Image (spheres, rainbow, N blue to C red):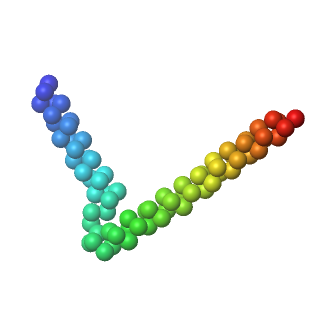
Amino acid sequence: MEKEALGETEFNLTGREAELQQNFRLDLDDEDAIHFLQGLINESISAFFPQVVETIHQWAQSRQHITRLSRL
């Protein structure tokens, strides 16, 4: 049973290595890898920034609503 578990672990590690190679593009040279990762960072920032702005906007609106209610 221990050998079976070990075999499964080895198989999963191999799958994880393939996933890492695919995700991090280990096939690229240094210059291409820099451009690839910079593109991923830019995509992440452009996807994250609108969420931050929306959260701040919602917070500001709720704050204004509370301020208006307290004046009544």
The residue at 29%/69% (across/down) is 28
The residue at 54%/61% (across/down) is 46
Number of marks in the rendered image: 0
Q: Residue 3, position in %: x, y?
A: 12, 30
Q: In the rendered view, does 36 fall on the left or right side of 51? A: left
User: Farthest bottom residue?
Assistant: 31
Residue 41: image quadrant is bottom left
The residue at 22%/47% (across/down) is 14
Q: Which quadrant: the C terminus? A: top right
Comparing 22 with 68, the one in front is 68
Residue 25: image quadrant is bottom left
Q: In the rendered view, does 13 fall on the left or right side of 33? A: left
User: Farthest right residue?
Assistant: 72
The residue at 22%/44% (across/down) is 13
User: Farthest front residue?
Assistant: 71
Q: Which quadrant: the N terminus? A: top left
User: Farthest left residue?
Assistant: 3
Q: In the rendered view, does 52 fall on the left or right side of 58? A: left
| In the rendered image, the vertical position of residue 10 relative to residue 28, given as above or below | above
Residue 33: image quadrant is bottom left
Comparing 53 with 66, the one in front is 66
Comparing 16 with 46, the one in front is 46
Q: Residue 48, position in %: x, y?
A: 54, 55
Q: Residue 30, position in %: x, y?
A: 27, 71
